[in-house]
Image: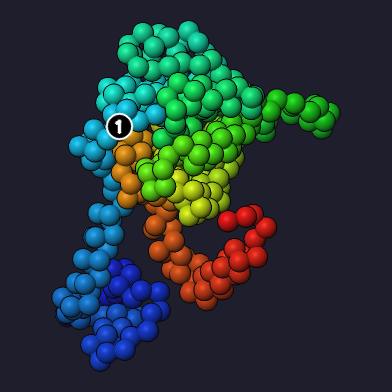
Amino acid sequence: MTRQKRPSSAVRAIEGGASFRSRQEESYCSAANNSILTTDAIDRLNRHPLHQLHLRTRSKQQAMAEYTPDEKLFERLRDKVIVLTGRASGIGAATVRLLDEHKAHVVFGDVNASAAYDNVVQHSSTATFVQCDVTKYEEFYRLFKTAYAKHGRIDHAISCAGIFEQGNCFDPGLTVDSVGEDPGNTQTMDVNVMGTLHCSRIAAVFPRETIQKGGNKSLVLLSSVNAFRESPGLFLLYQIYKHAIHGLLRSSRKTLFERDGIRVNAVCPGVTNIPMAAHVARPFREQGLSVPKPEQVAKIIVGLEVDESIQDKAFYIEGGGAWEFEDGFVREQPRWLGEKPTRRMRVNSEAVQKGALVPK
């Protein structure tokens, strides 16, 4: 009979040092925590009812994380008024076309009027284009005001504007003399962070003022896989600013939903087949990796708008699939941070919220 270290599945079956109350639970805990198990013992452990329950629970959690939009719900888009900012090409254009296909009234803005006409307007019967520089607050406001003046309300908003930076902030060619020069260009921050913030600020007001209480209102933020996964040496500023968008999700979602009934969610695509990312997608294809189409991302965005059961979530999008990860981040916190600091942090968070200066 061979002896070997216990399998990692047995370790994972013990949920972070939880209290075991029944005799059955105590026996399972004792067996799973033995540093050395025989082959027979491992087999018995894997057949243990609590281990099977753990596997079923883990499978259910994984299944819950994967998200497929219910396209039957897309019929709810008819006559809804939706404001979309940025990207008259790529993901933004694909989203406008999908909304238009389902008879929504879309008012979208972008700084590039020719791209808006070529990719969207000439193919749409209902979409309204407003030339809009997302770095200028007054133009943002004009976009929303145009939608409100034309349709009398705004149901949903989508923040799609985003750009990569030019140059390398940590250029290896910098010297002790040249690094003293202020790079000066804040456009990447102005578009990715301030543009998204301004869109969110204005989008929080119009639905609140124009949609009856209990109506379906939502805000979808376009983030990126770079909001939670590092890509060393690639788009340094872009990564920083996508982290900021994720911070915006976490800081606004509770207040906007509880106070105004506005659901806030974010999508975090990986490399997508859009003009802006063409140079990044090329090596993916060369290695035989799948590069999602913007239409696949658009379906996720639209799904989050129409499904009223989804709020406070973030979805990683890759290869045509989508997985929610905010719930897992919170659920697994005691495991990766520890139970004691997790409890302390949650108590502290509640205390901060009670004393917050931001009005409810």
Which quadrant holds the N terminus? bottom left
Where is 53 relative to 117, above or below?
below
Find numbered disc 1 in the image and state the secondary structure of the residue it sits on: helix
Q: Is residue 231 visible?
A: no
Which quadrant holds the C terminus? bottom right
Residue 293 screen position, x and y as percent: 32, 26
Residue 266 screen position, x and y as percent: 44, 42
Name which residue lies at 46% across and 15% down.
129
Write down the quadrant of residue 243 in the picture.
top right
User: Is 43 or 1 nearer to us in this picture?
Assistant: 43
Q: Is residue 162 visible?
A: yes
In this view, which residue lies farthest toward the bottom? Answer: 23
Name which residue lies at 48% across and 7% down.
114
User: Is 39 or 346 nearer to us in this picture?
Assistant: 346
Residue 49 screen position, x and y as percent: 18, 78
Residue 145 screen position, x and y as percent: 54, 25
Question: Taking 76 as reference, is 43 left or right?
Answer: left
Q: Which residue is mark 1?
A: 77
Pointer 1 local density, CA inside 10 Å: few below 14, some 14–19, many at least 20: many
- Residue type at mark 1? Leu
Question: Taking 172 as reference, is 303 left or right?
Answer: left
Question: Taking 85 as reference, is 299 left or right?
Answer: left
User: Is 84 or 5 nearer to us in this picture?
Assistant: 84
Name which residue lies at 64% across and 60% down.
356
